Image: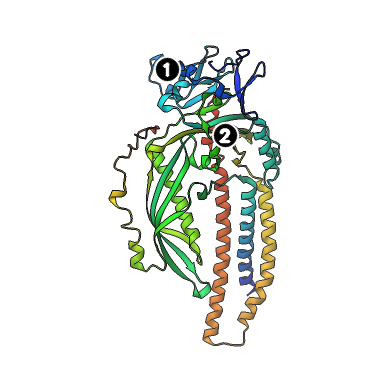
Amino acid sequence: MGVLAFLLAIGLGFGLACLIFASVLAKSNDIGNSVASSGRYSVGISYDRSRDKLNRNERETFTTGYIHPEDYNPNEPASEKLVDQTGK
Amino acid sequence: MITQCKNCAGQLVFDPKKQKLVCDHCGSEFKPEEFDVSEKIPLWEQKAESMNDIYGTDSKEFMDCYVYTCHTCGGEVIINGTEASTKCIYCGSSTVVFNRISKQKRPKYIIPFNLSKEDAVESIRQRFKKGMFIPRDIKHFQADNVRGIYIPYWVVDCDHKASVVVSGIVGSGKHSRTVYYGRAGHLNLSKLPLDASKMLSDESSSRLEPFNLEGMKSFDEDYLLGFYSNVSDVTYGDLRKAACKRANEYFNQLVLDSIKGASSKKVIASNTLTKIDYNNLRYAMFPAWFVTYYHKGKHNTILVNGQTGKVVCGVPWNKVLFYTLLVITGIALTVVSFIVLKPILEAMFTSSSHSSSSSDSRFKLIAFFIVAAVGMFTLGITKIRKVIRSINLTQAQSIFNFVKKRQE
């Protein structure tokens, strides 16, 4: 029983220590690790469809059929072309 | 050079503190708007010549080497394929490659430097003072090189259409179950800045954000005086990929934040389309200070947002101190956990009831403790590795390469 308790204690103790010190290390040495939040560039998502508790069939089909071929821009500039301000 | 002091014809450089062009010789100050753009138009035709063309060779060594004539002394300045401004190695004056920022290639906007070189270095020192695991010799670092560089950006408007399926855990213990959520909608992004230089990674440049876009001014070459700059060299494919990646990250984060009452949420399936408004692409230059220092045989680079002063860097860490404190704390927490867990486990196993259901719940509880211990340990190690990876990202050689190949 003591052995089991010891093993569990090591996992919990060192695991918690790693979590604490990873946060401290990030705060200390990983400086400026953030990008601008989405709120800076948008007002939020405008939802067309929203469903909770999807069953298996719904899960498999939910992402299909939302984007249609006509949604794509047929006049998009070629991928290998350098970007310029004319957008052409 | 066209933009000369009106009083003594001396060299002008842009002073971030004063937000004016200042003469090196007589100290006169001028606003960039005081100089007529039309005087520079004849210079727009002067191109940088490829060294391979000059020597009539096809050498790989000269592939990205161009020669440009300094307007002040006539000396030959060697530049790469994307530099738009640099310093002449002979007379030290700022040299603007007008041809690369003329006509259709002319940026529309620029955010001038707001922070001087000294302020940038000072803000780094102040930030380093707070770092618990930053080695002492780095806290008192000597900058090897400090360069103000205008980074090219494309400021885009885009519409991101996506449908996603999110999984989440609801409930706790033996009552927990996985629930699936479906969300589909549009996210319109306006004035999203995307780095337009292939040499600088998007991960690094995006960390310089946010820039205050209200501070964008109409582009004028005179803001480049005293600084380095690059022109855009990305393709439409690169731009679409960058826009899609950013829009996707924002969309997924907003969806995950909107789902309440579930934990361990993640997007497990998605279908997305990002459409950029190509009629409204804005080419701009944003300022950043690049400060390099030498530590244990390796160059490290610190980025500072030249407008807001945000410092971005992964600093080498004091491994001895870190692991010593980690082990000591780990031992202390292990002792505390042992003191707490031992009586609980003993009580469970010496319980007077021997019914099968009681025995069953005892084993489930032990299994829960084992999973929690293993999970906590794995989570801790994973987090440390993630932080180390993030620190190494901004120590990447590519950032140093973006800075080093420039004239002094």
The three-letter amino acid code for the residue at tag 1 is Glu
The front one of B169 and B190 is B190
A3 with respect to B213 (left or right): right
Taking B103 as reference, is B235 above or below it? below
Asked whether the residues under the numbered discs 1 and 2 touch, taking CB atoms below 8 Å apart as contact, a structural biologist would say: no
Taking A50 as reference, is A84 above or below it? above
Residue highlighted by disc 1: B45
Q: Few, some or many C-alpha atoms within 10 Å of disc 2 (few <14, some 14-19, many ≥20)?
A: many
The quarter of the image holding the N terminus of chain B is top right
Residue B16 is situated, as x and y percent measured from the top left of the image, at 62, 29
Q: Residue at x 65, y 47 (%)?
A: A28
The front one of B231 and B1 is B1
Q: Helix or strand or loop: what does disc 1 sit on?
A: helix
Identify the chain of the residue marked 1, using the numbered disc in the image. B
Residue highlighted by disc 2: B288
Q: Few, some or many C-alpha atoms within 10 Å of disc 1 (few <14, some 14-19, many ≥20)?
A: few
Identify the chain of the residue marked 2, using the numbered disc in the image. B
The three-letter amino acid code for the residue at tag 2 is Ala
To the question of a shared chain for discs 1 and 2, the answer is yes
